[in-house]
Image (spheres, helix red, strand yellow):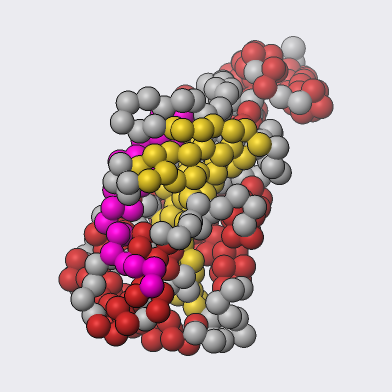
């Protein structure tokens, strides 16, 4: 199954796309301008879509994209380049089976300080030049623009999952904190690089504490970082207060990471922070550990049911029905059960994998693994049939593969089938 073509269309009704322009900029970046009724003016949007092979070779059955929303995401900016390049790199990870990411960069202009800050009556904040000169207090309108105008546009024109990552630097991080405080469901993962949490005498931290009392179930990922040079030191006390609050309140299902960056100023904090944030974020997609698998194998509920429960629990955090990929099923589950001499459980798991991925370009490997399991059970005729079915699936999905990959898979199946037939005396 191939993804439909990803091209912006003219959006009618209340949300007007005033211009659409495809540009040759690195890998597939499209620029559009949306008029926002909530903000009262146009917003420029840049959308990066990963190119081949990720569009055709994503193993996720429903072939959807996760979405990164980047504040200050002007085309050609260092921040946009940084985020696109990092997410383009992790799009190459097909093993852990998360959908590839598109990056939606939102242009910032003279309205930035207004858009990224909530209302405040704190006199010290209002006296600061940034806010006295350029304004403040439109964060609520900006979140309405995101939720009710931009998100629906992306959903309409791109095949996306329910998963959204929000990234903000400096006042962009301030807005992300405000979003978490007021409507945590806007994003599943929040990346805050050097956010100004001093704003309004730390009103966003107080709001967070009020919104999420001790032991609250949050079901969101939060990464926060700050450097130690220049006015990073002005931001640091508020961020450290947030860190202390989170550690003291023992929230449920709230992966939280705070990084204090050494020898880092405000300009370079995103460059230092993003790889660290992604390292922590990618752990959300990890399969069960060996210790967990050992517990699952001993459970009266059965290994497969425990695996299904494990991935079902990820849904509230990730925002969509996340499932293990074919490699995980073969290498982490079936192989483990075979090592535990639980061939019957392994057969249930591999059959589940075949049902999940009936026509994936890598589905043939599930039939190879099924043949291994059936041979272990002494069912040689069944193992031979599994390999033959693998050939059928391989030929049906040949158009999705590079020719070299097809030849490799065909030779692998032929060799295994010959071995089994010889063993069966055919």
Q: In the image, 12: left or right of 208?
A: right
* Residue sitting at x 32%, y 49%: 39
Q: Is 139 one of the magenta-colored residues?
A: yes
Of 383 and 139, nearer the camera is 139
Instruction: Specify whether 371 is left or right of 188.
Output: right
What residue is at 36 percent from the left and 59 percent from the top?
A: 115
Query: Could you say where residue 257 lies in the image, as x and y percent from the top left?
Result: 44, 70
Image mark count: 0
Dividing the picture into quarters, in which one does residue 16 lie? top left
Q: Position of residue 24 (x, y in %)?
A: 70, 37
The residue lying at 63 percent from left, 28 percent from top is 56
Q: Main secondary structure of the magenta part?
A: helix
Q: Position of residue 328 (x, y in %)?
A: 56, 43
Q: Looking at the image, is 131 positioned above or below residue 228?
A: above
Q: Quadrant of residue 242?
A: bottom left
- Relative to 121, does residue 151 appear above or below in the rendering? above
The C terminus: image quadrant = top right
> Can residue 398 be seen at all in this image of the molecule?
yes
Pick the front one: 374 or 333: 333
Q: Nearer the viewer, residue 420 or 43?
A: 43
Task: Return the residue nearer the eye: 339 or 236.
Answer: 236
Q: Is residue 393 left or right of residue 426?
A: left
Residue at 27%, 56% (x, y): give it. 140
Q: Position of residue 155 (x, y in %)?
A: 41, 33
The N terminus appears in which quarter of the rendering? Answer: top right
State the extent of the magenta-drawn residues as a range: 133-157
């Amino acid at each position: 199954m191939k993804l439909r073509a990803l091209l912006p269309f003219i959006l009618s009704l209340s949300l007007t796309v005033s211009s659409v322009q495809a540009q040759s900029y690195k890998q597939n970046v499209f620029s559009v301008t949306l008029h926002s009724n909530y903000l009262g003016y146009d917003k420029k949007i840049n959308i990066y879509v990963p190119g081949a092979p990720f569009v055709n070779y994503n193993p996720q059955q429903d072939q959807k994209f996760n979405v990164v929303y980047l504040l200050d995401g002007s085309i050609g900016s260092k921040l946009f380049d940084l985020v696109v390049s990092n997410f383009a790199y992790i799009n190459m990870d097909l093993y852990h089976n998360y959908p590839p990411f598109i990056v939606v960069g939102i242009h910032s202009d003279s309205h930035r300080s207004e858009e990224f800050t909530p209302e405040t009556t704190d006199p010290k904040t209002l006296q600061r030049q940034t806010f006295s000169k350029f304004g403040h207090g439109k964060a609520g309108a900006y979140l309405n623009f995101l939720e009710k105008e931009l998100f629906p546009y992306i959903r309409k024109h791109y095949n996306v999952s329910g998963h959204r990552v929000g990234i903000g630097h400096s006042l962009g991080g301030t807005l992300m904190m405000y979003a978490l405080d007021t409507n945590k469901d806007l994003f599943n993962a929040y990346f805050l690089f050097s956010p100004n949490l001093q704003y309004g005498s730390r009103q966003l931290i107080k709001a967070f504490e009020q919104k999420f009392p001790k032991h609250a179930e949050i079901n969101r990922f939060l990464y926060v970082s700050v450097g130690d040079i220049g006015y990073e030191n002005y931001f640091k006390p508020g961020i450290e207060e947030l860190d202390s609050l989170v550690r003291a309140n023992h929230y449920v299902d709230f992966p939280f990471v705070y990084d204090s960056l050494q020898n880092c100023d405000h300009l370079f904090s995103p460059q230092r922070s993003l790889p660290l944030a992604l390292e922590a974020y990618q752990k959300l997609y990890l399969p069960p550990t060996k210790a967990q698998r050992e517990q699952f194998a001993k459970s009266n509920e059965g290994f497969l049911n425990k695996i299904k429960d494990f991935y079902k629990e990820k849904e509230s955090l990730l925002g969509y029905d996340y499932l293990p990929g074919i490699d995980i099923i073969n290498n982490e589950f079936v192989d483990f059960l075979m090592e535990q001499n639980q061939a019957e459980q392994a057969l249930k798991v591999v059959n589940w994998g075949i049902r999940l991925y009936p026509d994936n370009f890598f589905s043939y490997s599930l039939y190879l693994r099924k043949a291994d399991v059936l041979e272990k059970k002494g069912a040689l005729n069944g193992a031979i049939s599994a390999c033959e079915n693998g050939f059928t699936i391989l030929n049906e999905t040949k158009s999705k593969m590079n020719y070299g990959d097809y030849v490799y898979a065909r030779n692998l199946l032929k060799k295994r089938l010959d071995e089994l037939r010889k063993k069966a005396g055919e």
